[in-house]
Image (cartoon, rainbow, N blue to C red):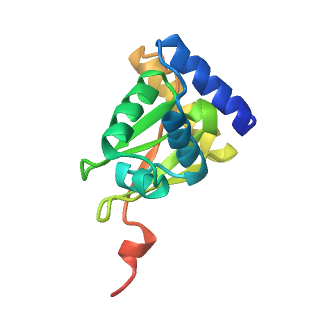
Amino acid sequence: MASSSAEMHETVAERLGSVGQRFTPKRREIVEILERAGRPLTIAAILEAGHSLAQSSVYRNLVVLEEAGAVHRVVTRDGVSRYEMTEDLMGHHHHLVCTRCGSVEDVPAGEGLENSMADAVAQIDRSTGFTTDHHRLDLVGLCRRCTRPC
């Protein structure tokens, strides 16, 4: 994981360079928005946070950032894509995904959970012959707002 914002930006620039792209001011703005968010954002939320960004530009730049391995796309049951910086840049975490409103929140990966996940992954790998590189856990249900009585 990049330990500072400057190191993360340097890593993003290197990854973009490896796919023949530059770290343009618009891409930098998108990265800064995602870095501050602390949760995956829809394109609408990115546009709201970045007043100088055009929708078509955000779409194109997110594709390039995803191709370069700097951004990860989270697609939920509502079919809406949400974007976040990759875990190796921002830290390992899991998601809470609301089936009613479509919100996605980050949940830090605690040591106990990660130890249990490592045990489960090792057991699955042994029984299937699969070799796991990494894992993601999405807990799917209803968020606080959607479970509140009206």
x 42%, y 14%: residue: 129
Along the viewing direction, whichever of 10 and 93 lies nearer the viewer: 10
x 26%, y 50%: residue: 77
Numbered circles on residues, count: 0
| Residue 83 visible in image | yes
| Residue 91 visible in image | no
Task: Give the x, y percent position of residue 131.
Answer: 47, 16
Outermost residue, right direction?
3
x 61%, y 30%: residue: 88
Task: Give the x, y percent position of residue 96.
Answer: 45, 55
48 versus 137 height, above or below: below
Image quarter in which the C terminus is found? bottom left
Image quarter in which the N terminus is found? top right
Along the viewing direction, whichever of 52 and 146 lies nearer the viewer: 52
87 versus 133 height, above or below: below
Task: Answer with left or right where residue 110 lies relative to residue 84.
Answer: right
Outermost residue, bottom direction?
150
Along the viewing direction, whichever of 56 and 42 lies nearer the viewer: 56
Q: Report which quarter residue 87 is drawn in.
A: top right
Task: Give the x, y percent position of residue 13.
Answer: 59, 23
Task: Give the x, y percent position of residue 99.
Answer: 30, 59
Along the viewing direction, whichever of 139 and 13 lies nearer the viewer: 13
Outermost residue, front direction?
52
